[in-house]
Image (cartoon, coloured by chain):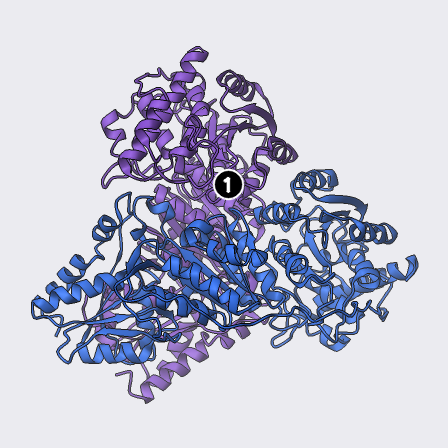
Chain colours: A blue, B purple
Amino acid sequence: MDTAELTELGQQLRVDSVRASAAAGSGHPTSSMSAADLMAVLLAHHLRYDFDRPAHPGNDRFVLSKGHASPLLYSAYKAAGAVDDEELLTFRKLGSRLEGHPTPQRLPWVETATGSLGQGLPVGVGISLAGKRLDRADYRVWVLCGDSELAEGSVWEAAEHAGHEHLDNLTAIVDVNRLGQRGPTRHGHDLDAYARRFQAFGWHTVEIDGHDVDAIDRAYGEAISTKGQPTAILARTLKGKGVESVQDREGLHGKPLPHADEAIEELGGPRDLRVQVHAPAETRMLHSVPTGHLDLPRWEKGEEAATRDAYGQALAALGTARGDVVALDGEVSDSTRAEAFAKEHPDRFFECYIAEQQLVAAAVGLATRGWVPYASTFAAFLTRAYDFVRMASISGAGINLVGSHAGVSIGQDGPSQMGLEDLAMFRAVHGSTVLYPCDPNQTARLVTAMAGLDGVRYLRTSRGAGPVIYGPDEEFPVGGSKVLRSSDRDRMTIVAAGVTVHEALRAADALAGEGIAVRVVDLYSVKPVDRATLRSAAEETGLLLSVEDHHEQGGLGDAVLDAFLDGRPMPRLVRLAVRTMPGSASPAEQLHAAGIDAESIAASARLLVEQAIAP
Amino acid sequence: MDTAELTELGQQLRVDSVRASAAAGSGHPTSSMSAADLMAVLLAHHLRYDFDRPAHPGNDRFVLSKGHASPLLYSAYKAAGAVDDEELLTFRKLGSRLEGHPTPQRLPWVETATGSLGQGLPVGVGISLAGKRLDRADYRVWVLCGDSELAEGSVWEAAEHAGHEHLDNLTAIVDVNRLGQRGPTRHGHDLDAYARRFQAFGWHTVEIDGHDVDAIDRAYGEAISTKGQPTAILARTLKGKGVESVQDREGLHGKPLPHADEAIEELGGPRDLRVQVHAPAETRMLHSVPTGHLDLPRWEKGEEAATRDAYGQALAALGTARGDVVALDGEVSDSTRAEAFAKEHPDRFFECYIAEQQLVAAAVGLATRGWVPYASTFAAFLTRAYDFVRMASISGAGINLVGSHAGVSIGQDGPSQMGLEDLAMFRAVHGSTVLYPCDPNQTARLVTAMAGLDGVRYLRTSRGAGPVIYGPDEEFPVGGSKVLRSSDRDRMTIVAAGVTVHEALRAADALAGEGIAVRVVDLYSVKPVDRATLRSAAEETGLLLSVEDHHEQGGLGDAVLDAFLDGRPMPRLVRLAVRTMPGSASPAEQLHAAGIDAESIAASARLLVEQAIAP
C-alpha cells in the first residue's frame, strides 16, 4: 500500500472502532483511534500471519497489551477478512466473540488475554523466548502498549528480561497518546522520557510521529533489522485522533463517541478496504518434541525426603521423557529444587531472576506456543503474581506453578517467607487445580499428572524432609485422596495434607494407644476434592478435623466443605490452622505454636471426644 | 569517627553478624558482611535517630529492604546501644524480637516488615512522601537495597514515583555484591547498568566502592545535599567481605559461616564499639491533625446510588472531619470515585498512576507515619499487590484498601476487569477486615468505621447504582449484619452482600407472593462475620442459601461457615456463586448468566423447597 492507502486504512480502522463502540454503547474508541495508524501499517506491511491458520508455526504473534483498544483489534480483523461487518457490530454483546477485552478462549487469533494493563509485554517476552530458544522459528512478536501502562513495574521486569536475553524478535509499539483514564500521564508526550528508560534496560528505541504512516513503516523496518536488542517504538499520537471534538481531550476515556454519525463523517465515512496480510514463511513443524520413557525417581518407605526435592528430581525426569516440558524459576532454584531440571535440561530452563510477575508471564507466553511450563518460586512470593495468575485463567493458559516453602513449617526465616495464603489464592482461580503432596513418591506422580491438565495447576511443596509413606508405584489421581488409617470404630476423621499428614499420623497412633480410633485422610488433591471419601468419612465417623499449615480461610478446611455444597447436611468440622502471626522458631516449634502438630491434634481429638462432640 | 574507627565499626558489625548467625544456626551473614561498611558509616555519621524515642517526629527512617540481612541490622542496634549482646544472640530463636526478617510488630525501630524483596524502596517512597507533603519534617529516608531485588518491577514503580515527586529526602543505598541466592545477578558488578536505570527514572546516582568508608561518607553527604532528586548510591561490595573462605563466593547465601570462630578471628575478633547516633532535630509535633464535625453524605430511601459513589463522597467528608485521613488511587479515581476526595483535599491525595504495588506500598509508608490511608483501584487490580498486602499484615500496618468494580455485575468490560477473587484474597490475610456494602448509607458508615480498625481493612464497592434500602442514620457495626426479611415461617435464609442483596430482596418478595417465606440477611461484614445472626438463621430456618458475585471459593459462602467452626453441627448450605468464565454482556445479563440474579435465587429456592431440602 502507498501512503495514501495506508492513511485510508487507518481511517477505516477508526471508523470501524467508532461504529463498533457506538453499537455496543460502550468501549474505548478514543484509545483505538490513537493507535489506528500504527495498526494499519503493521497489518498491511509487516505482520506475517495466516488468519486461516492461527496455529501456523511461522505466524508472527501480535499482543494487544492495551486490551481496552479492542475495537481497533477487531476492526483490523475485519480489514484482514477474519470477521465480517455484522460480527464487528456484535462487539461487547452477550455471546459475542468480540469481548470488551480480547481473550484467546473465544478468538483464535488472540495470543493472551489482556485488559489488566502491563501484562502484554511480559507475556510477549515469553513468546519471544519460545521463538528464540525453543521453536527457533523466525516469527516476530509485536506488542502494542499504551503509555499509561508503562507505570506498571511488570513492564520493566519484561524490559529487563528482554534486554538481557537480547530478544531482537520482539518489538514494543508504544502508543503515546499522553492521556490515561482519568487524565494526563506522568510524561505526556515526552517520548525521550520513555526512550531513556527502555535504553537503560538495553533496548533499541525509535521515536516517531505515530500518525505519519511512512515514519511508522520505516520504524517497523528498523525494528526488524535491529539485531541483538529488542526495539521499542515510541509513537507520539493523539487520543481520539481524527475527530476534532474528542481529539487529545480529557474525560473521554472508555466512552463511545458522543456523536458517532458526525464523527464517522468527519473521518471520511465508512470504507471497506481489505488487506492481504503477508503470509508467514513456510516452516518446519512448530517444534519437534522428542518423547521417551518416563523414569521417575523412586523412594522407599523408611527413607526421608522433602517434597521440594522430589519436585526437582521428578521434573528433571519428566523433562527427559517429554521434550515439551520447560521450567522457569525466580532465582531460587536451589531452594525450589528446579535446579535439578536446569542441570539436566539447560536448554529448556529459563532463569527469571527475582521477578515473579515476569516468571508467570513468561510461562504463559511459552504455553501459548505449546510448551508445558513449570514455574517455581517460594509459595509466598507467588502472591506477587496473583494478577498474572488470574489473567492466565482468563486466557485458559495451561501453566504449572510450584510454590515451595509453604507454611510455618519452614521454621526460622519467619512469616515473610511462609506461604500461608497460597491455597486460598489458587483455589479461588477459575478452573484451577491445587495439589499438595506430603511424600516424595506422591509428589513425583502429581508433577507428572499436572502436565496433562487444563488451566492453572498449582503444586505446593514443603521445605523439610518427611518420611516416605507411599510406595513408588502407588497412584494418586487428581481429585483423589488416600485413607491412611481407618477402622469401623473411628470417632472422627483427621483430614490433612502436606506436612500435617505426618503430624496426623503420629496423633492417630498416639490416640490409638489410648483407645481412641481416628481415621486419617491425606487430601493431597485440594481442588478438585475427593467428595466420595470425605462424605463417607463424615457419615461413618461423624466429625471431621481438618489440619492445615495455612491460614484458616480458603485453605484445606474450606476445601473439605467443597464436598458438601449441594444442600446435603454438612458435616461437623473443626479446623486447626495457623491463626496467629508466626515469628522465628524451629520447624517443630512453629508447628506446635500454630497448634497443628501431632500433640495439638491429639489434644484436640481428646477434647472433642470428652465433650462428646465426637461420636 | 575517623576512617580507622569507621572501618573498625564495619568489622564489628561483620563479627556480630557472624556470631548471631552462628548462634542461630541459620541466617544470612554473607549478605550482612557486604553491607557492613555502608551501615557503619550511616549509623555513625549520617543517621539522625533517637533509639529511646522511635516515634520522635524528627527521626530519620531506615528501611532494610534486603530484610534477610537482619544480622547486620541487629548488630547495628547493638552498636547503637539499643539491644545488648545477650539479646543479639537470641537471633531467630522462639520468642526473640530478633526475627529472621525484621518486623515492626516486634521491634520499635523497624518501619516496615521486609523479607519479600523489592518492597523496602516502595514503602520508603511512601514514608518520603509523608515527609515531603504531609509531615513537612526534614527527616531523611534511607533504604538499604540488595542488587538482586532490583529485578522486581516494584522497585521501578517506586523509582518512577520518587523521581516524579522529586523526593530528595530519599536515598537508596544499593549493596551491589553481585551474588543473588543461587548465583550471580544479571549485571554482576556493573554499577553503570544500575546507574543508567535509576538515572532514566530521574534519580541522581553515585557509584562507589562500598568498602571504602570515606567514599561512603562522601556519597551520603552528596545524597543529603542533592536537591530536587532522590539519590541512588550504587556500592560495589563483596558478599562475605572480610573472610577469605566465603568472600565473593557462590553457594553461601543464607547459611551461617562454616567456621565461625576462625572467621571471627580473621575479622579481628569481637569488639564493643558504641556509636553515639546523631539526635534528630527537635521539631514540631508529628503532624497537627485538625478535626471537625463528620458530616456524612445522606441518601433517602427511594433514591438510587452506587456504593462507589458513596465511597468517594463519604471519604471526602471523612477527610474534612479528620485531618489524618489521606487517599491514594491507581489512576482510576474517576471510576473508584476517589476523585471526590482529591477535589476537596488535593493536599492529601496521592495519584499513584497504574502501579498497584506502589499504591499499596505508599499507603503502608504513609501509615508508618501515623496517617490513615485509603487506597483505591478496581478490585481486580488489587490482586496485583497481594504480596504487598500480605507483608502489610506482617507489618501490622493500618491501611484501608478499596476495590471497586467488583464482580460480574460490572457488565460489558468482561472478566479482566471483574474482581472475582478479592474476597478470598483478603479473607486469607491475617487480621484483616472485609466489608462489602450494598447501599450508599451503609457504605458511608463503613468507610468511617474502617478508619478506627487495626490491620488491613478491605472495602468492596460496586459499579452500578442500586436502590437505597437503609436510612441515613442506621448503624452498621463491623462484625454485624442486617436481617432484611424475617418471619417465623421462613423456610430458608438467603445470605447476600453487595449487589446480591438487592437480587435476594426481589427474590424473597417474589417467593412471598407464592407463599414461600424466606429470610434475607445482608452480610455486609464478611470478616469478621456475624455469628449470632447466622446461627439463629440456621437454627430457625434450617437452610442457608448464600449468593455472591464472586467465585465460589473463599468468598461469602465460606464466610458464612466461619460462624460454625467450633465443632457444632454445621448448617445446610447451598451456594450460588460465579462458576463459569464470564464474557461481555450487560450487568443484568451477567447476573443472570452467573445464576445469581433474583430469578436464579427464586428458582433455586423453589427447587430446594420442592425437594424438601428446605424445611
Q: Quadrant of residue B160?
A: top right
Q: Position of residue B538 (x, y in %)?
A: 24, 73
Using the image, determine if residue B507 lies above or below residue B27. Answer: below
Q: Position of residue B12 (x, y in %)?
A: 35, 21
Q: Is residue A223 left or right of residue A372?
A: right
Numbered disc 1: what chain?
Answer: B
Image quarter hosting the C terminus of chain A: bottom left
Using the image, determine if residue B384 lies above or below residue B288. Answer: below
Is residue B324 visible to the viewer in this orientation of the structure? yes
**Which residue sits at x=85%, y=71%?**
A272
Residue holding disc 1: B149
Q: Position of residue A139 (x, y in %)?
A: 73, 62
SS under mark 1:
helix
**Which residue sits at x=78%, y=59%?**
A39
Image quarter hosting the N terminus of chain A: bottom right
Q: Position of residue B555 (x, y in %)?
A: 38, 64
Q: Is residue B34 left or right of residue A59?
A: left
Amino acid on which disc 1 is placed: Glu
